[in-house]
């Protein structure tokens, strides 16, 4: 009985895969914010015909 308990200490030892947690969700939120920012930047630059200098 002690050998079985000594092998499995926590979730990592049992072989169960951990599901996505809140940090993975925050990664997707930040990725979508970056993509939206890039899209809005492209739309703004199209208004100026991609000319940045004066």
Image (cartoon, helix red, strand yellow):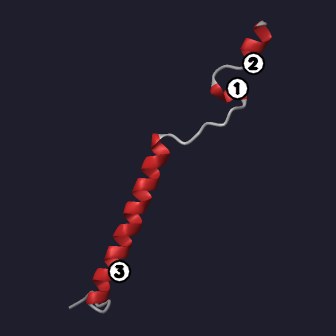
Please report the residue visible at 30 percent of the width from the left and 92 percent of the height from the top.
49
Instruction: Identify the mark nearer the N-term, 3 or 1.
Output: 1
Mark 2 or mark 3, which has the lower sequence index? 2
Q: Which mark is residue 42?
A: 3
Is label 1 in a helix, a strand or a loop?
helix
Q: Which residue is mark 1?
A: 13
Residue 1 percent across, percent down from the top left: 79, 7
- Vertical side of 9 occupied by 48: above or below: below
Which residue is farthest top? 1
**Secondary structure state at the residue bearing disc 3:** helix
Q: Which residue lies at the image location 37% right of the left edge and 61% below the top edge?
A: 33
Side of 25 where 40 appears, left or right? left
Residue located 46% across and 43% down the image: 23
Judging by the rendered image, the residue that carries numbered circle 2 is 7
Residue 44 at x, y = what percent?
Answer: 28, 81
| Residue density around tag 3, few if under 14, some if 14–19, many if 20 or more, within 10 Å | few
Instruction: Give the distance between the C-alpha atoms of the residues marked 2 and 3, in whole angstroms.
Output: 54 Å
Q: Could you say where residue 21 lies in the image, as x and y percent from the top left? A: 50, 40
User: How far, Cα to Cα, is label 2 from label 1?
Assistant: 7 Å
Q: Mark 1 Cα within 10 Å, few/some/many (few <14, many 20+)?
A: few
Question: Disc 2 on helix, strand or loop?
Answer: helix
Locate residue 30 relative to residue 3 in the image: left or right: left
Residue at (41% x, 67% y) in the render: 35
Quarter in which the C terminus is drawn: bottom left
Marks 1 and 2: in contact by CB < 8 Å?
Answer: yes
When asked about the image quadrant of residue 13, the answer is top right
Q: Quadrant of residue 3?
A: top right
Count of numbered labels shown in the rendering: 3
């Amino acid at each position: 009985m002690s050998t079985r308990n000594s092998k499995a200490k926590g979730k990592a030892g049992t072989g169960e895969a951990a599901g996505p947690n809140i940090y993975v969700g925050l990664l997707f939120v930040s990725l979508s914010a970056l993509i939206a920012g890039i899209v809005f930047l492209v739309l703004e630059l199209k208004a100026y015909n991609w000319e940045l200098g004066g």
